[in-house]
Amino acid sequence: MLTVRNLPPEPTFRDWLQENTQLLVALGAWALTMLAISGSVPQGVASSWHVVRFVEGAAIYDQTQSESDCDVTEASGDGICLSGPGL
């Protein structure tokens, strides 16, 4: 029978944590930053109007001042008007 000696020990979960500590800290900081950014974005108002345009496959939402401004844009064929809850 063949005996193998002087092999390095199998890496453990603790070894993996020690090797990747900086990565885990960076991922945690990134997650907290994303959470802070998402919390600072203003939420849509139910009474606001938006014009939706499609440019090269992407939907672009523009907020308008009033429903009449939105209707003028929709009549010209540039976009579709939606109210806040319809988004």
Image (cartoon, grey):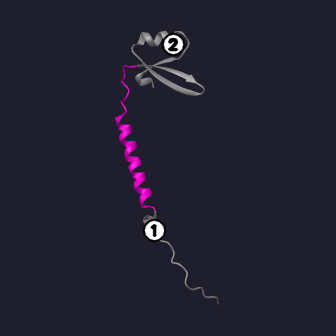
- Callout 2 secondary element: helix
- Callout 1 secondary element: helix
In this picture, residue 51 sits left or right of residue 28: right
Q: CA distance from mark 1 to mark 2?
A: 59 Å
The residue at the far right in this view is: 1
Q: Are marks 1 and 2 in contact (CB under 8 Å)?
A: no
Residue behind mark 2: 74
Residue 66: x, y in percent?
39, 13
At label 2, the amino acid type is: Glu
Locate the N terminus by quadrant. Answer: bottom right
At label 1, the amino acid type is: Phe
Residue 5: x, y in percent?
57, 86
Residue occupying image coordinates x 48% and y 9%:
72
- Towards the viewer: 77 or 86: 77
Residue occupying image coordinates x 43% and y 66%:
18
The residue at the far bottom in this view is: 1
Against 54, residue 65 (above or below) is above
Residue 31: x, y in percent?
40, 47
Q: Is residue 3 magenta?
A: no
Against 17, residue 86 (above or below) is above
- Towards the viewer: 33 or 61: 33
Residue occupying image coordinates x 41% and y 23%:
84
Residue behind mark 1: 13
Q: Is residue 31 magenta?
A: yes
In this picture, residue 76 sits left or right of residue 49: right
Give the magenta part as a residue range: 20-48
What secondary structure do most residues of the magenta stretch adopt?
Answer: helix
Instruction: Please tell me how crowded label 1 is: few (under 14), some (14-19), or many (20+) other residues with Cα within 10 Å.
Output: few
Instruction: Please tell me how crowded label 2 is: few (under 14), some (14-19), or many (20+) other residues with Cα within 10 Å.
Output: some
In this picture, residue 35 sits left or right of residue 53: left
